[in-house]
Image (spheres, rainbow, N blue to C red):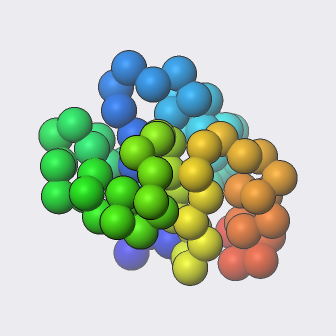
Amino acid sequence: MNSVTVYSTTWCGFCKMVKQYLNDKNVPFKEIDIEQDRAAGQHIVDKTGQMGVPVVEIGNYTIVGFDRPKIDAALQDLKLT
């Protein structure tokens, strides 16, 4: 089971950047395209109160946007890097 999930769209530049960032760190992740999975998109809106992407779930952390310091802290906390 993946500890990291990226909610994204195909057209989002920051989504592409966060996925590349995780790939560069050799962090496996599950990608969910919220345009294809509307229920997942609604789950993220309900959880965060925001409609933006990317949203990165790392364990119990939910990070809205491509926020490197928060991503790094969550990955370090879960010992994924």
Q: Residue at x 40, y 45 (%)?
A: 51
Q: Is residue 40 left or right of residue 3?
A: left
Q: Position of residue 50 (x, y in %)?
A: 46, 51
Res 79 seen here: no
Q: Quadrant of residue 75?
A: bottom right
Question: In the rendered image of this protein, does residue 5 appear above or below residue 20?
Answer: below
Task: Report which quarter residue 24 is drawn in.
Answer: top right
Q: Residue at x 83, y 53 (%)?
A: 69
46 to the left or right of 58: left
| x, y percent for residue 66 | 65, 41
The quarter holding residue 10 reads top left
User: In the figure, is residue 47 to the left or right of 56?
Assistant: left
Tell whether 19 sits left or right of 78. Answer: left
The image position of residue 20, as x and y in percent, is 60, 33
- Which residue is located at x 17 percent, y 49 percent? 38
In the rendered image, which quarter contains the C terminus?
A: bottom right
Q: Residue at x 60, y 43 (%)?
A: 65
Residue sitting farthest toward the front: 49
Q: Is residue 15 visible?
A: yes
Q: Give above or below for 22 relative to 80.
A: above
